[in-house]
Image: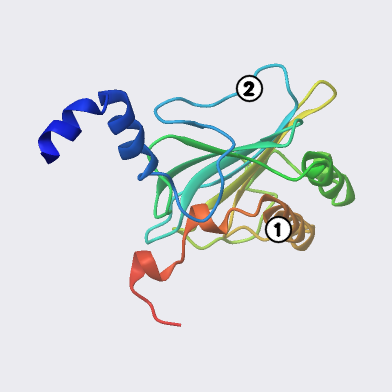
Amino acid sequence: MMMKCLRLVPAAVLAALFLSACAPQGYTPYYATPGGNGEQTDLDQITLQRTACFGFCPIYDVTVYENDVLIFHGERFVAETGGAVSKRLPDGSFKKLVDIAKAHKFSEFDARYPNEAGDNCGPIPTDMPSIIVSFEGKRLNHEVNLYQGCRFDGRESFDEMVLAMDAVLDIDDMIGPREDFYGAKE
């Protein structure tokens, strides 16, 4: 009897039920593009990227467009991997990110720390991740690539800027708890 009922249910309905059971937990995606990059053309954007270290540093990039859509690409040591996952941020979030960048004079930071000559940062430890913050817009294109072992005048302001941006992005659920990756207990 059960088999007869299942034959009556169209395959599309079964597929929809199956796929809905696989939806990510903890946030509501605006849209998702597995395997795609999810980019939106002709919009100003701010991207924050964290790179690898020798360990369990989260590796991902997150882009926010001027229409307040966030696109997250997780690579390693994050909860969400395998494509672009997106969500709509509260209205005005992109503007908040721009205001944070302006308050910390983002456009005045060097493009790279350390630079090729190595003269804009003191002695640096090895095997640290980098943070890359970029703004691509109609009026400004600037990127700052900071190797986290680098110390320079203005580093405190840069760190405060990134922390303030992290608060607006609200992606802790996409990154996941650190103990999931290295087994630490709180």
- Lower position in the chain sequence, tag 2 or tag 1: 2
Mark 2 Cα-neighbour bin, 10 Å: few <14, some 14–19, many ≥20: some
**At x 80% / y 41%, what residue is drawn?**
91
Point out residue 147 in the picture as x, y percentages from the top left corner.
57, 51
Point out residue 47 in the picture as x, y percentages from the top left corner.
65, 38
Question: Which image quadrant is residue 152 in?
Answer: bottom right
Depth order, front residue of 105/152: 105
At mark 1, the secondary structure is helix
Residue annotated with mark 1: 167
**At x 39% / y 55%, what residue is drawn?**
77
The color scheme shown is: rainbow
Residue 129 visible in the picture: no
Distance in Å between CA atoms under marks 2 and 1? 23 Å
Point out residue 119 in the picture as x, y percentages from the top left corner.
68, 49
Residue 62 visible in the picture: yes
Which residue is farthest top? Answer: 42
Name the residue type under label 1. Ala
Q: Is 152 displayed left or right of 70 in the figure?
A: right
Depth order, front residue of 167/68: 68
Point out residue 180 in the picture as x, y percentages from the top left corner.
37, 66
Residue annotated with mark 2: 40
Looking at the image, do the residues carrying marks 2 and 1 touch, with CB atoms under 8 Å apart? no
Name the residue type under label 2. Gln
Which residue is farthest front? Answer: 1
**At x 57% / y 60%, what residue is drawn?**
149
Mark 1 Cα-neighbour bin, 10 Å: few <14, some 14–19, many ≥20: few
